Image: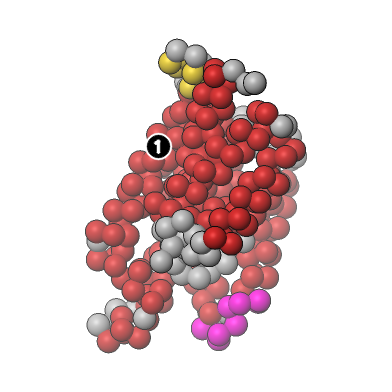
């Protein structure tokens, strides 16, 4: 019989891990869930964000999460450029399914090879004031390297939710996914709206990458571990739903944490994706899907 302390710490670790998963998946919820763009290179952009934070941290001593904030405009511009190439090459011609997927696979490997050439294959870490230590709440330990990214992740998700639900741009983004012709009748360019939304989705990778390198050491190919996970969370939460993304990410984090604690880490992916299949069999639209 597991002790209560062990159960509480496993639950806490799962909640904190789920907050990080939500930050990594937020961009996919926009690009795939709303825009229907299968950006398989999304985890590679997250790793780029990690290395950007690492570079600024080692060169100037900047806090890695602050570094993530500072490179947000650069990642936004990168996302806008990638979408423009994707639109001109595939979407405009109606070839955005299989060929578009191949395009993002290509970006994934180009980014990985570029990082290997630039930084090598050694694991990299950052120095942060909250990299060590924890807050003890009775028997429960809250590692600062997990707690700080968790709190900033919640703030980022709240800002994105406000953007999508309370602003004209957000309503335009939701509308372009449902009826682009209606936007044209209102003299709004659907392509421009999609470009902005996709750029925002890539900009989130700057923050998610900063969270990742605070939580664990990184190397160029580590993003592959998150490809299946981010799409699973997006589908499980309900396509295009940020609250659903957070709920699914926390659920997956808790399940992985309990599985790793009591059965071993090798079982965690199988149990987590088994949960996904069961949930979708009962509710195909996902937790918050309509």
137 and 41: which is toward the camera: 137
Relative to 141, residue 34 above or below: below
Report whether residue 26 is seen. no
The residue at the point 54 percent across, 17 percent down is: 5
Relative to 271, residue 161 above or below: below
Q: Position of residue 266 (x, y in %)?
A: 75, 38
Tell me, yes or no, whether the highlighted magenta stretch contains residue 48. no
The residue at the point 51 percent across, 83 percent down is: 92
- Dot 1 corresponds to which residue? 152
Q: 160 left or right of 52?
A: left
Report whether residue 285 is seen. yes
Give the magenta range: 92-99
The residue at the point 53 percent across, 79 percent down is: 91
The residue at the point 43 percent across, 53 percent down is: 244
Rendered-image quadrant of the C terminus: bottom left
Q: Position of residue 44 (x, y in %)?
A: 62, 52
Rendered-image quadrant of the N terminus: top right
Picture quadrant of residue 104? bottom right
Tell me, yes or no, whether the highlighted magenta stretch contains residue 96. yes
């Amino acid at each position: 019989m597991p002790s209560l302390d062990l159960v509480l710490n496993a639950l806490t670790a799962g909640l904190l891990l789920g907050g990080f998963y939500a930050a990594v998946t937020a961009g996919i919820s926009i690009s795939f869930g709303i825009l229907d763009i299968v950006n398989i290179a999304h985890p590679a952009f997250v790793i780029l964000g990690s290395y950007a934070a690492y570079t600024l941290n080692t060169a100037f001593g900047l806090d890695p999460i602050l570094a993530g904030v500072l490179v947000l405009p650069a990642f936004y511009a990168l996302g806008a450029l990638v979408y423009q190439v994707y639109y001109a090459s595939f979407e405009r011609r109606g070839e955005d399914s299989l060929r578009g997927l191949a395009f993002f696979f290509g970006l994934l490997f180009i980014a990985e090879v570029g990082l290997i050439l630039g930084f090598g294959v050694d694991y990299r870490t950052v120095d942060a004031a909250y990299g060590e230590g924890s807050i003890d709440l009775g028997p429960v330990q809250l590692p600062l390297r997990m707690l700080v990214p968790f709190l900033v992740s919640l703030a980022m998700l709240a800002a994105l939710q406000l953007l999508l639900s309370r602003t004209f741009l957000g309503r335009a983004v939701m509308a372009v996914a449902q009826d682009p012709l209606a936007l044209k009748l209102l003299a709004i360019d659907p392509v421009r709206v999609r470009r902005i939304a996709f750029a925002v989705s890539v900009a989130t990778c700057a923050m998610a990458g900063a969270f990742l390198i605070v939580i664990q050491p990184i190397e160029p190919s580590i993003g592959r571990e998150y490809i299946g996970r981010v799409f699973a969370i997006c589908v499980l939460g309900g396509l295009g739903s940020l609250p659903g993304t957070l709920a699914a990410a926390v659920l997956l984090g808790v399940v992985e944490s309990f599985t790793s604690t009591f059965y071993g880490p090798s079982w965690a992916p199988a149990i987590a994706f088994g949960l996904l299949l069961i949930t979708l069999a009962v509710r195909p639209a996902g937790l918050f899907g309509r």
